């Protein structure tokens, strides 16, 4: 796509969004919502008070998330993940299932009170990173380092410099450090974190904690105790299960299941693949381990749709209004 085409596409998208917001302001959208039928599983991540795209493009503000819940209660039917799989749907409404990935502590701080306020269920997919001795996921750490750290770092005798989108890139190959680490196991990720911690004293900034801090074990148990929260697994170290070895993926899935079940004293039978990445072998292994609900983003293989354990999800977009998000949720697509 040329630059001119990109500009035209952006202007068209913004015009469509503005048109829909105007329609909503004039109460012209009621029929669209009430006539919608079907179902969708949504992916949320972190919730913060402001500046939601400060470190990554997956957070929502608390105000925006509550607006989503108000829409859901007014127009849609919100179901638990178990009800979604059992297709216990409202026949005359669009059915929504809410999921939260990555195990941020802000899910306990901000999300749980709103779920209880609006009587809305959600599933939280959590890693085993706390048991491993860390309070931050490796990818969040790298994102924060790129904001506060040096313009240039050295790792394994290779120089990485800040490039496009504030990402460290190899000075020689141009390959991004985040992509190099995503294809590795956690030992390499831990080495980079140990190397860069002294260069990035971000933990002294209390205002940033909402953007990276992971749930404590007590917070996970408190979430699990709520009738509105279900706990699922999201890998142990948040590794890409399709890029590490199959034995490594199996350990990730088994150890995260064992950690969570021992912690909350309940079965954990749902797994959301980190980054939405998996192989057919990983799917088979997950089923053998005892997961009966496997959550992707987009299906990656033709046979996925026929697998009763597999479901697709849609990631919410922090850059559009709640009204436009509801359109995308129903249509399962964002404007090009």
Image (spheres, grey):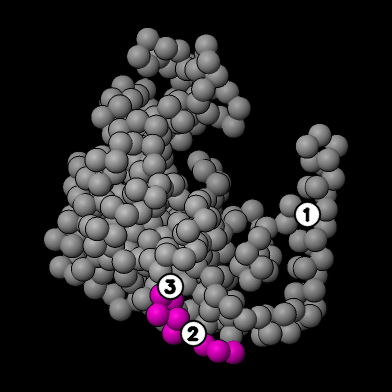
Give me the C-alpha separation between circle 3 and circle 1.
31 Å
| Residue position marked by numbered label 1 in the rendering | 13
- CB of mark 3 within 8 Å of CB of mark 1? no
| Residue position marked by numbered label 2 in the rendering | 89
| Residue position marked by numbered label 3 in the rendering | 114
Q: Quadrant of residue 323?
A: bottom right
Q: Residues within 10 Å of mark 2 (few under 14, many from 20)?
A: some
Q: Residues within 10 Å of mark 3 (few under 14, many from 20)?
A: some
- CB of mark 1 within 8 Å of CB of mark 2? no
- Given residues 289 and 144, the one toward you in this image is 289
User: Closer to the camera: disc 1 or disc 2?
Assistant: 2
- CB of mark 2 within 8 Å of CB of mark 3? no
User: Where does the magenta region start and end?
Assistant: 84-92
User: Closer to the camera: disc 2 or disc 3?
Assistant: 2
- Quick one: label 2 or label 3, which is nearer the N terminus? 2
- Quick one: label 3 or label 1, which is nearer the N terminus? 1
Residue beneath the point at 33% across and 25% down = 192
Magenta highlight on residue 150: no
Quick check: 118 above or below 323?
below
Magenta highlight on residue 86: yes
Residue beneath the point at 32% across and 70% down = 230
């Amino acid at each position: 796509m040329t630059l001119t085409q990109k500009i035209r596409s952006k202007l068209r998208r913004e015009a469509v969004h503005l048109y829909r917001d105007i329609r909503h302001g004039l109460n012209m959208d009621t029929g669209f919502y009430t006539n919608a039928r079907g179902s969708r599983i949504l992916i949320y991540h972190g919730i913060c008070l402001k500046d939601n795209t400060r470190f990554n493009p997956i957070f929502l503000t608390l105000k925006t998330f509550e607006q989503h819940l108000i829409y859901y209660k007014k127009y849609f039917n919100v179901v638990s993940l178990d009800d979604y799989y059992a297709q216990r749907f409202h026949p005359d409404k669009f059915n929504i299932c809410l999921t939260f990935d990555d195990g941020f502590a802000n899910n306990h701080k901000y999300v749980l009170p709103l779920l209880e306020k609006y009587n809305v269920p959600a599933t939280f997919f959590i890693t085993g990173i706390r048991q491993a001795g860390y309070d931050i996921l490796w990818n969040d750490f790298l994102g924060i380092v790129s904001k506060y750290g040096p313009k240039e770092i050295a790792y394994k005798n290779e120089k990485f410099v800040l490039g496009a989108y504030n990402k460290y890139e190899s000075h020689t190959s141009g390959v991004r450090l985040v992509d190099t680490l995503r294809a590795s196991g956690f030992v390499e990720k831990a080495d980079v974190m140990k190397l860069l911690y002294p260069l990035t004293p971000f933990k002294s900034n209390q205002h940033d904690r909402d953007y990276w801090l992971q749930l404590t074990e007590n917070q996970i148990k408190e979430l699990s105790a709520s009738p509105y929260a279900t706990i699922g697994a999201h890998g142990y170290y948040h590794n890409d299960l399709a890029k590490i070895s199959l034995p490594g993926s199996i350990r990730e899935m088994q150890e995260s299941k064992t950690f969570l079940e021992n912690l909350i004293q309940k079965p954990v039978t749902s797994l959301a693949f980190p980054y939405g990445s998996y192989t057919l072998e990983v799917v088979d292994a997950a089923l053998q381990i005892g997961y009966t609900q496997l959550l992707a983003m987009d299906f990656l293989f033709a046979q996925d749709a026929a697998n009763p354990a597999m479901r697709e999800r849609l990631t919410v977009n922090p850059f559009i209004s709640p009204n436009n998000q509801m359109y995308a949720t129903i249509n399962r697509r964002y404007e090009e």
